[in-house]
Image: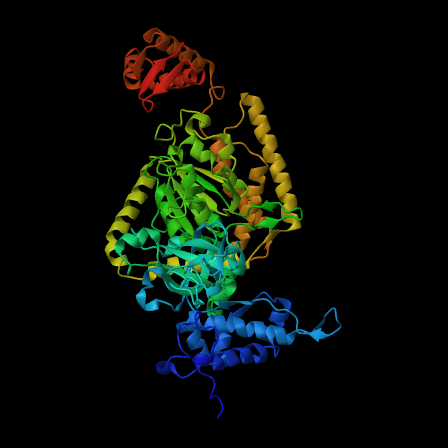
Amino acid sequence: MSGWDEGAVFYSDQAQFPRGGGDPDQGSITRHTALRKFKEFLRGFHGQKGDFPYRESLVHNPDHLTVAMEDLDDFDTVLSDKIRKLPADYLPLFEAAAAEVLASLRLKVATEGGEMEEPAVGEVQIFLSSKESSTSMRSIGSESMSRLVKIAGITIAASRVKAKATYVTLMCKNCKTLKTVPCRPGLGGAIVPRSCDHVPQAGEEPCPLDPWIVAPDKSKYVDLQTLKLQENPEDVPTGELPRNMLLSVDRHHVQTIAPGTRLTVIGIYSVFQSSAVQKGGVGVKQAYIRVVGLEQTSGANSNGPSNFTLDEELEFKEFAQRPDAYAKLCSLIAPSIYGHVDVKKALACLLFGGSRKRLPDGVRLRGDVHVLLLGDPSTAKSQFLKFVEKTAPVAVYTSGKGSSAAGLTASVIRDSSSREFYLEGGAMVLADGGVVCIDEFDKMRPEDRVAIHEAMEQQTISIAKAGITTVLNSRTSVLAAANPPSGRYDDLKSTQDNIDLQTTILSRFDLIFIVKDVRMYEQDKKIASHIIKVHASGATTTKSTDVAEGENWLKRYIEYCRVTCEPRLSEKAAEFLQHKYVEIRQRMRQQAHDTGKPSAIPITVRQFEAIIRLSESLAKMRLASVATEEHVKEAFRLFEVSTMDAARSGINEHLNLSPEMANEIKQAETQIKRRMGIGTRISERRLIDDLTRMGLNESIVRRALLIMHQREEVEYKREHRVIVRKA
């Protein structure tokens, strides 16, 4: 006779769970049995160490409990299958079981009268976690409705916290009868009955239809927040727009997520009636996911080093011990581009990155390396950017002309349905933990360029718009490519004229490379043969998978090094670094004294920190825990061939001028002033042709024009094609 009263008829809370006591088709497990099994699971599940993890967790954290689906599978497969297929029915049972188990685990408390009674226990929220691989947002369809799904993405918006009723108390207008109606969880509402249950007495007026009014102060509420989850940038197919999914989080998950955070979410795929969809008819609903478990992922890796197999880890450690590991890694960077060895080494440093540090007073020091490539067209700058975008575990590619300040940092948007403001993260927020590639950096408007100052050094983005004041993380490396103002790098001009960027933004770049298109017979011959080889073998390489495997291996190796290795400087290396930095500052001071002008690229404490970061990233490539003197020397060499070389490049009118040349330049200036009256404009080409016909050297005329431009006697217009004489 056991189990004669287990039917759903005797269950008191039927309105919340409309289905009966288990589906007859899918194994006869009733609600009563499920509740009992859930209690057994929480009380008696043994962990790997022989302890009782869920019992202990409940005692320490009485508000919420995280349950691994794998543990539930081991305990009872039927139960875990029910949770996966009918989560809306069985999760409330699980939470009720957790509350009962918690009450039984607690000691009785003494009342004022001295009697012992059971302690009051609140609700327990169950969080689910799973090690299954997440599915794509694009593959979730109607067949997943009301089932558990697991998706990964990046949060782009978070709404304000709202109060959501769990039980609504209704009052009849006529007879003042109170009735409590349960609300559907998530974004669902309550089903309000049409008529009142009150039986009118003799002479009493019967209650009309729809007599109920809501009594808000007598209803029960929980916190609710909606998030917008977007596909990870690396998962979006080429040419497609990223998809969004609405998430609903409640109770203890509220206000734990900021825009820009990467998430892996387990939730129930549900629908609600949106006001925007009503025109399409009653049958059309908007989908959302009611979150029952979420996990923040650091960067692109979900569970840290556990993502890598033992074979992979052994292979990576073996590779790191090779003496030629550094050279091999640099050869894997953009193999289709000929030459530019030092640029490739710098990009390797950017991909691996230095070590982030948090000081005792809360100050964070960035570990990301920023690189600027400046120079002539057709020197493969954009190809480098595209390669880094493809290889970095997390990357966002954007062009300077089409990017605004809000698009790079974050924008405040008003929701069309609720009319409230919410934050939407831009490129720098989406690439948190990765690389932002900005092409055509010089074409950006100056006010937009200023917006990324804070993101580059402090690694945060502060927002104070429309009543929203917040700080978002943007721990990204920046790789930018730019052209000089005249399109090509002009050796006749000084560095200030060639690099038309503010000192404030230049000092934030760790390495600045000037990439020139040098016309040399031997080199041109080699480049031409390399390009012919690339084009000739292009048809065959598409069929072979070696290249793709190499890229994939490099991506995994970078990911592994970034997760497992955080190198620090050794004492010898630190001492060597200190002497070198003081020496460079002394040299730059001497140069400024000799020429009477400060350097176009400043050498400041930021550059000193840049060398430390480069040394750490070079050590990280070898999976070394300490950066040695060798690493510091290589970092200095890279710094010398890039930033220091850029600071010395170009001519200066006070340098290397013999008396004869100075006299010739003066003559050319006199002729230019005679040829051009104040306020007149003339084509540069025509002016140079006229003066060369008079017997002057073209390079002398160009230098004279440059010196006059620096003295602001002439002005260039129309991309340096027209010269205007100023007063």
Residue at coordinates 41% horizontally, 43% vertically from top-left?
414
Residue at coordinates 35% horizontally, 45% vertically from top-left?
383
Quadrant of the drawing holding the C terminus: top left
Outermost residue, bottom side? 1
Q: Is residue 615 left or right of residue 547?
A: right
Asked if residue 47 shows in the view, the reply is no
* Closest to the observer, 355 or 24: 24
Q: Position of residue 450 (x, y in %)?
A: 47, 34
Q: Count the marks.
A: 0
| Color style of the picture | rainbow
Outermost residue, right side? 114
Q: Quadrant of residue 121?
A: bottom right
* Closest to the observer, 397 or 536: 397
Q: Position of residue 594 (x, y in %)?
A: 56, 22
438 up-or-down from 206: above or below: above
492 up-or-down from 41: above or below: above
Q: Position of residue 705 (x, y in %)?
A: 38, 17
Q: Position of residue 271 (x, y in %)?
A: 36, 61
* Closest to the observer, 603 or 58: 58
Asked if residue 577 shows in the view, the reply is yes
